[in-house]
Image: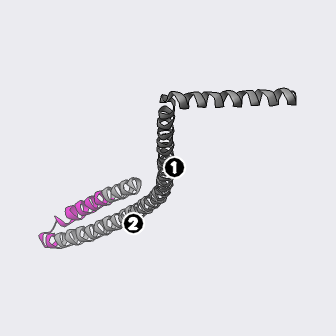
Amino acid sequence: MSQEFLTIIVILVAGFGFLFWFVSQKFSALQQGSADEEKTKDIVNQVFGEVSDKVINQAKHILQSDKEAIYKDTEGKRKAIEKLVQDLKVEIDQRQDEIRKLEQDRNKKFGEIEESIREHRKITTELKTSTQSLSKMLSNNQVRGQWGERIIEDILNNAGSRICSGV
């Protein structure tokens, strides 16, 4: 882009140099007669007008080329950004699905923990009731004695059955 521009500038400078030389040659030839002076001005104006038109057309051509290059570059960047946004959207959707699954799993685990706590409360309540019953029973001497006798009988029966079975 800048090489083309420099080339055009060099051509224009050379053209203006040639034009200046040409006009100065014509001007020196025309100085010989004042009638030709008016013709020289017309020729100079005509040549400068043609050169100006060519310079303007070249500048328009260069600017159009630059405009097209900028448009192509912008279009490419727009497409790249759109792809990046689409990729990010897919990634975000995947992460949201993962988060939903983790949330469901967490809720399930909390439900299991809550159920386990309920079961432990129930067992604790039953143990409390059993302990209170046992405490009441053992506070009575007669009941405590009967319970002790029962335990000893069970131990002896278990020991006797093991001896008989050869364990």
Left or right of 2? Residue 125 is right
Q: Does the magenta stretch include residue 36?
A: yes
Q: Say whether residue 165 is visible.
A: yes
- Could you give the CA–CA distance between mark 2 and mark 1, rounded to whole angstroms? 66 Å
Residue in front for this viewpoint, 93 or 59: 93
Question: Is the C terminus in the top left, top right, bottom left or bottom right quadrant?
Answer: top right
Q: Which residue carries the number 2 mark?
A: 68
Residue 20: percent from left, percent from top: 25, 59
Q: Is residue 92 magenta?
A: no
Query: In the image, what residue type sits under mark 2?
Result: Glu
The answer to whether 133 is drawn above or below residue 153 in the figure is below
Q: Residue at x 48, y 32 (%)?
A: 135
Residue 112 — which label? Answer: 1
Q: Main secondary structure of the magenta part?
A: helix
Residue in front for this viewpoint, 75 or 159: 159
What stretch of residues is rendered in magenta?
Answer: 15-38
Quadrant hosting residue 46: bottom left
Query: In the image, what residue type sits under mark 1?
Result: Glu
The answer to whether 102 is drawn above or below residue 28 in the figure is above
Element carrying mark 2: helix
Coloring basis for residues: one colour
Left or right of 64? Residue 166 is right
Q: Residue at x 41, y 64 (%)?
A: 75
Residue 8: percent from left, percent from top: 36, 59
Query: Do the CB atoms of the residues marked 2 and 1 lie less than 8 Å apart?
Result: no
Crowding around mark 1 (Cα neighbors within 10 Å: few <14, some 14 to 19, many 20+) is: few
Q: Earlier in the sequence, mark 2 or mark 1?
A: 2
Quadrant hosting residue 35: bottom left
Q: Nearer the viewer, mark 2 or mark 1?
A: 1
Question: Is the N terminus in the top left, top right, bottom left or bottom right quadrant?
Answer: bottom left
